[in-house]
Amino acid sequence: MSQWVWFAPGGDLTRSFRVSQGAGAGLSSVPVYSGGVVWVGGSHELICASPSTGRALARTSIPTDHSVVEYFDSATVLSSGHAYALYQDNAAHLAGVASLTPPAACSG
């Protein structure tokens, strides 16, 4: 299964474009607005995008756990210079909150 996150400028679906491949495997990839940017999670990268254009400002790879993909939900919150994202690790059967330093372009 695969999912895609789309952006429609001004709500115009005729001009929509793909922003990122989402988490897939039935996991959620709902974009979240925090810190002046839109966060898009997935299984391979976490993206921050411009809320006005939908274009990616920066991308950061999500590490694997012994070659097994981890998923970052897009429920990412930017606070005091740190980003916090929900994650799920299928190898260890864990889920929780990951703290990461966001790229400078994601500071809003």
Image (cartoon, rainbow, N blue to C red):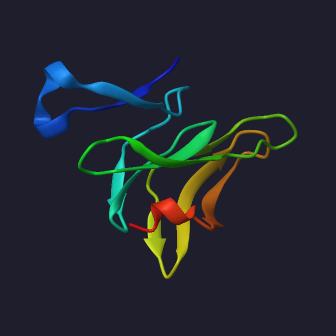
Q: Position of residue 28 (x, y in %)?
A: 44, 38
**Vertical comparison of 33 with 101: above or below:** above
Q: Position of residue 33 (x, y in %)?
A: 32, 58
Residue found 84% across the figure and 34% down from its top: 67
Residue 56 quadrant: top left
User: Is any atom of residue 73 visible in this view?
Assistant: no
**Vertical comparison of 46 with 9: above or below:** below
User: Is any atom of residue 97 visible in this view?
Assistant: yes
Q: Position of residue 78 (x, y in %)?
A: 45, 70
Q: Is residue 17 left or right of residue 46?
A: left
**Vertical comparison of 70 with 76: above or below:** above
Q: Nearer the viewer, residue 62 or 72?
A: 62
Residue lying furthest right = 66
Residue 19 quadrant: top left
Q: Nearer the viewer, residue 101 or 24?
A: 101
Which quadrant holds the C terminus? bottom left
Residue found 37% across the figure and 41% down from its top: 55
